[in-house]
Amino acid sequence: MSAPAVPTRRVAKAPPSWAGIAPSVVGIMWRREMLRYFRDRSQVFGGLSRTVLWLVILGFGLGAALREIEGYSYAQYILPGVIVLNVLFAALQCAISLVWDRQVGIMREVFVSPSPMLSVALGKLLGGATVSVLQGTIPLLFTPLIGVRLTVWSVLGAWGVMFFLGLFVTALGVIIAARLRTFEGFGSISNGVIQPLYFLSGSIFPLRGVIGGVGFLEIPQHLREELRRLGIFAIGGGWVVQLPGWIQALVYVNPVSYQLDLLRYVLLRFHQLPMAANLAVTFGAAPVAVIVAAWAMRRMGQAGR
Amino acid sequence: MSLDPAREGPLAAGTAAGGPSAVPSGASVTRGQTPAVEAVELGRRFGDVVAVDSVTFSVAQGEFFALLGPNGAGKTTTLHMLTTLLTPTSGRASVMGFDVVREPQKVRQVLGMVFQDPAVDERLTARENLELHAVLYGIPRSERAEAVEQALVWASLTEAASRRVRGFSGGMKRRLELARALMHSPGVLFLDEPTLGLDPQGRRHLWERIDALRKDGLTVLMTTHNLPEAEACDRVGIIDGGRLVEIGSPAELVARHVGDAGDLEDVFIALTGRQLRDEEATARDLMVSFAKRGGEHTR
């Protein structure tokens, strides 16, 4: 058998780019993330099962004991948290695949190509952010069940926050992934990164709250307002509870707390942290993380193996 | 070693005839032409470990050159330095006249690379992998579809084009990668152990493809520890312990070291000894064994 003719000669050149950004490369790397996502049913399944476990089972289960938080049911209160959890998983899974791609996957092919790494990184990060929005939308489908009314604006606002959160967390993951040479599974990332960010973000308990028994004590409205001015939020009726100082400190330094708080405001019109801080962290942290992540990927390409 | 069918392939005939620009000795290159690859005292150390120690050689355009050596000799490290994946710690190197450190972008445009183990996205189809390559190498939008189809035909993968690469055999993946590496008409094709892990049929098929390229005048630099493959090359550089210990055409090396009775394997053993080369597992080996255990969650 004779081999077919050698393909047409072409002139290889770097893809057209402006200041290191080649739109075609950003586009194809983004598309790759999308194709990978839509071909991985287990990821969608993970998003669904997390939502059911946290929002429905924990939400209604714990919700039976904690009647309300600031007039919201417990399931309603943790809705933004469950969205954030899905975003964290989606974004980090996308980022961590870099470790794999680099050792035995497509990343080596990318490193030897004349494509600017900044564009490759941007495509990857935008892809991670888009997958984050898709995965974060799963809990929104459950809102009729828990009695949260969505408007066009609250959904658009939530997508915006999810996108920036996804971008930030993917970038964070890429920075971690660029330093990992091997990894044995996603479990360590889940336990070591996702869960601390999630639990220390005010996702499942308010920063300061009034917690109490099943109708043990109803808090009168004027007292409620008084407490709110002090930054204390009421869960059901009962005693004022404040997190230990060190947990509070961790919540305050966790950027996800602010992104989550903004998401909660967008969906429920309720927030616990200063709005200016929420906006600044959500829209400021992502671009900074993107720049650091792009730089980390560039270095990874140069350092080789 | 005559068990290897690759020796009986068309390539063996090609060797006898000599390549289009076979250079007669271990000395430098065709005069007046930029060497396709040139390494001058090229070295790389990792901490205290010297992986490649002052390697000097050049490959002429149109030449078919093999770096031959035992495991851990520094073949892949040398290849990675030449393909800009690894920065040399000493010496210099150029590909088609472009310096690998100062002009990495230029070097990347003129080289084609096939890695030791597949560098493909297994969740994508063959066609999608090729499309990705076409974009990464700046093939204009209007030519992309044609380039992809040609590559699929060349790799005999038109029927499998829409299947995900995950289900491909080792030989299919290698053909896909070879076709991909040719899509942008590289000046030099780098092959890192191209037939490793292939069955005799797959190996023979791949050799036929490589042979066709060679007849077309493409420069090929490959690493191997497969001696029949090295014997089919215009020139061979034997590398051991990070040093280039010998260079020349297979016939010259045999004549110089073992006389008429021997073959390249005898030369190889004479130069590199009989000691077994055990290596520690690399990060990549760990990942591969992890994947084989089914532990990979992100693919």
Image (cartoon, coloured by chain):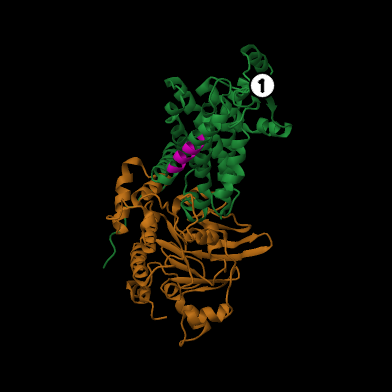
Query: Residue extending furthest top?
Result: A222
Q: Is residue A276 left or right of residue A102?
A: right
Comparing A176 with B154, the one in front is A176
- Label 1: few (<14), some (14–19) or many (≥20) C-alpha neighbours in 10 Å: many
Give the residue at mark 1: A232
Measured along the vertical axis of the image, is residue B178 above or below residue A280? below
- For the residue marked with disc 1, what is the amino acid? Ile
Q: Quadrant of residue B206?
A: bottom left
Q: Residue at x 57, y 59 (%)?
A: B283
Chain on which label 1 sits: A
Rendered location of residue A117, percent (x, y): 51, 43
Whether the magenta-drawn stretch holds residue B118 is answered as no
Q: Is residue B290 left or right of residue B145?
A: right
Measured along the vertical axis of the image, is residue B150 above or below residue A55? below
Bounds of the magenta span?
A45-54
**Residue B126 seen in the current view:** yes
Comparing B89 with B35, the one in front is B89
Comparing B263 with A293, the one in front is A293
Q: How many marks on residues?
A: 1
Q: Which chain is green?
A: A
Rendered location of residue A90, percent (x, y): 49, 40
Q: Which chain is orange?
A: B
Q: Residue at x 38, y 70 (%)?
A: B199
Rendered location of residue A77, percent (x, y): 54, 27
Q: Main secondary structure of the magenta part?
A: helix
Query: Quadrant location of the N terminus of chain B?
Result: bottom left
